[in-house]
Amino acid sequence: MIRTENLTKVYNGNKAVDSLNLEIAEGDIFGFLGPNGAGKSTTILMLVGLIEPSGGKCIINEIEVARNPLKVKEIIGYLPENVGFYGNMTAEQNLDYFARFYPIDADERKKRIGELLELVQLDGVSQKVGGYSRGMTQRLGFAQALLNNPDVIFLDEPTTNLDPEGVLQLRQTLKKLSDEGKTIFFSSHILAEVAQVCNTIGIISNGTLIERGTLEEVKTKLDVRKTVKIIVEATNEDMPKIEHENIINVEYKGRRAVIEAKTDIREDISMYLLENNVGIKELRIEEPTLEDVFMESVYKKPFFKKESFTKET
Ligand SMILES: Nc1ncnc2c1ncn2[C@@H]1O[C@H](COP(=O)(O)OP(=O)(O)OP(=O)(O)O)[C@@H](O)[C@H]1O
Ligand SMILES: [Mg+2]
């Protein structure tokens, strides 16, 4: 369980994180979304006890982080945004070095390092870490975050440098860890990634949490539910006057027009279009994507809305 209460961080008079209240249940994979500079990394740094809050607090499994930073470190794993290792050592040597900070006996340590290197597909790599690609370093960082078999795992943009196979493997591993009851906090601005792997999300903008809940809840709250698209054969000139309160956009592409509506107006409009001799090519319902949710909440407007629409009708 992860909880923040009015968590705030001020840098040079600016609030990087502003009265953040989060609650993430055990076993959840929480996606923490936000544009660059929103305050994601700052929040994580306070949660893992690496920087002190200017106000408020972080609680992990009932332990207050700022008061018990060492106790918290025993139960958490952390993959930083820019993970660093000793370049003149191998992956195994690096993991062994970090594992010695935890109370794990030598046999167990060797076994766990072997398993983790296999998990991130770096087993048998004898090359020193200094020569690793960014993706390899990030995978080693993920292994390091799991060294102490943590209950709560913080990953700051874990997929940034991974190739598609690496992303897929990470996704599968996170699902497995969550099934084992581990709580995962995953920050990203890759929206599709968060939609694939997380069951709850929070969107932060300018240090403030602007949306939170399950993906479905956030979608519903923002009222960016299904949209209906009707593709017809008509140009701007031969389109009959279309007036319907739930039509949100009409876009012309060559000899075709795409009519977009917020409710299922397919029956109404198809009768009307046929009466006006407009050929219908397609009628379909589209589910909202996480991009819709993100654009709606961060920029306060759906990106499909065109200013020209009011003029056209
Ligand atoms: N050490 C620091 N000193 C001063 N300002 C900082 C410091 N760290 C972060 N900030 C500022 O706090 C704000 C939030 O930064 P943060 O790194 O938390 O954003 P982020 O959401 O992680 O962004 P990104 O997606 O680019 O990683 C930014 O305006 C940043 O400039
Ligand atoms: Mg960041």
Image (cartoon, rainbow, N blue to C red):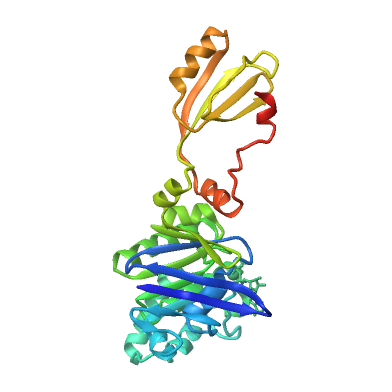
Image coords of residue 309 (percent x, y):
66, 30
Taking the spot 44% from the left edge, 49% from the top edge, the residue there is 221
105 w.r.t. 143: above or below: below
Horizontal relation, residue 260 to residue 199: left or right: right
Occupied quadrant, residue 178:
bottom left
- The image quadrant where one finds the C terminus is top right
Image coords of residue 21 (percent x, y):
45, 70
- The answer to whether residue 81 of the structure is visible from this angle is no
31 w.r.t. 151: above or below: above
Taking the spot 47% from the left edge, 83% from the top edge, the residue there is 95
Image coords of residue 160 (percent x, y):
57, 63
Q: Quadrant of ligand 1?
A: bottom right
- The answer to whether residue 201 of the structure is visible from this angle is yes
Compare residues 93 and 239 and report the one nearer the observer: 239
- The image quadrant where one finds the N terminus is bottom left
Image coords of residue 272 (percent x, y):
51, 13
